[in-house]
Image (cartoon, grey):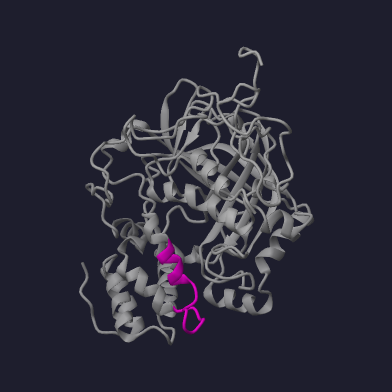
Amino acid sequence: MNEHEQRPVTTTDSGISAPSDEHSLTTGPAGPIALHDHYLIQKMAQFNRERVPERVVHAKGSGAFGYFEANGEAEKYCRADFLKKGNKSEMLARFSTVAGEQGFPDTVRDPRGFSLKFYTDEGNYDLVGNNTPIFFVRDPSKFQDFIHSQKRQPNTGRHSHNMQWDFWTLSPETTHQVMWLMGDRGIPKSYRNMNGYGSHTFLWENEGGEKFWVKYHFKTDQGIEFFTEEEAGAMAAENPDFHRFDLWNAIESGDHPSWTLKVQIMPFEDAVDYHYNPFDLTKVWPQGEYPLIEIGRMVLDRNPENFFAQIEQAAFEPSNMVPGIGPSPDKMLLGRMFSYPDTHRYRIGPNYLQLPVNQPKASVNSYNFDGPMRYQHSGDQPTYAPNSYGGPKADPEHARDTTWETEGGEIGRYAYVKRTDDDDFGQATNMWNNVLDDDAKSRLVSNIVGHASWEDVQPDMKTRVAEYWSKVAPELGERVTEGLGVGAVASR
């Protein structure tokens, strides 16, 4: 084949342009390979499974199809095509609870997953978030332990509030998220009445090569509504699939739910000496410093035709980022970029991206082959790169990695470097002092006391729970202490 003849551009199996056929992503020419090199991971993991279950978390969920329409306000910050003015992308949304199994009631107190798949002309873009802007832990090495603490005990097969509080009180970085969980938004009235967040910090790059840090906020146009503990319990008995019913019926009746997408933009240089680590998933950015900018709207207008094929087999992965969007130094995000596609290969199979719900609208030109359930193929295309016979070739310029320079230093296992305001309780304290009104405070205290009063919560654990909240605010600690009937504890 003539070397100057036009060749297709190499893509990932999600149809996103691949940055290189030959080079892995490293920290400098002699540095180690980055775990979040998702294209390398995809090639290795797919190869390992070439020869030929319910989700571990977020098992129970619901979803629908719709579209996202951009208003063009993001163009100055990001070169991704689907964010350009007037572009309308097909999309899929899946909402879920986290800890329970398929049969769990929808109205339990639990974070909600908020996972989105945009079928763009540049490949699938997945945003895998929650209905909270923060999370319980900031390092992926603790994620598995956190989930185990929310699941069933191996000896009894039961959930344990004592186990949950044991993990939370031993992990002070959980405080901010636990306050959200125990507050009003811990049980949304419906999937339509909750916000969604990308939660992580991401990196945007515009056409001129300028870089910006970004956080996503999907604001519900239906308004925030929630169930109290009593209302949620009653609904769990009456209709354990209430959220599933509500979403389906609203769309079926033509009452299409929508969310307005707003972003916070942080100039790239601000992150260097910001007074706390802006990539810490347990913290939010102040909107007074980084105000919300509206960039588009998401509408869900079509129910699935087959729930199993289109919702249960839907696979979302944070590593699916189209050109112009990249990760940040958020350790949880970097870990999830490997974890999610790997669990899909186990749960659904190595060719999960060939299922119709996961197929990109963009063309796929990949060097991954074979494996169970594979039905798309490329005929006599070479199975290796580089080659002289017409196989796809990477376009390093179009698919250049949107990334950042590292600070350097010896490779090791580190906690985030502490900054001026990097304590684990300060933002929760601010939430108590300046965000919650008196009624919301009372409901928060009632929810905490009720959760920590289950029969399996040991007396010494109740004392630890009271100490945990005393570090947030003396008044909160006193009210929890009184509610749990434990002795007075020292506040910070």
Which quarter of the rendered picture does the N terminus lie within? top right
| Residue 427 visible in the current orientation | yes
Name the residue located 58 percent from the left edge and 29 percent from the top edge: 72
Magenta stretch holds residue 244: no
Residue nearer the viewer, 192 or 340: 340
Give above or below for 394 relative to 234: above
Left or right of 74? Residue 102 is: right
Residue nearer the viewer, 267 or 388: 388
| Residue 436 visible in the current orientation | no
What is the x, y in percent for residue 66?
A: 70, 45
Give above or below for 73 relative to 277: above
What is the x, y in percent for residue 26?
A: 38, 35
Name the residue located 42 percent from the left edge and 46 percent from the top edge: 334
Left or right of 23? Residue 247 is: right
Residue nearer the viewer, 150 or 249: 150
Q: For residue 108, which quarter of the picture?
A: bottom right
What is the x, y in percent for residue 275?
A: 26, 44
Name the residue located 35 percent from the left edge and 63 percent from the top edge: 175
Which quarter of the rendered picture does the C terminus lie within? bottom left
Q: Which contiguous range is marked in magenta?
A: 144-160
Left or right of 374? Residue 212 is: left
What is the x, y in percent for residue 281?
A: 39, 51
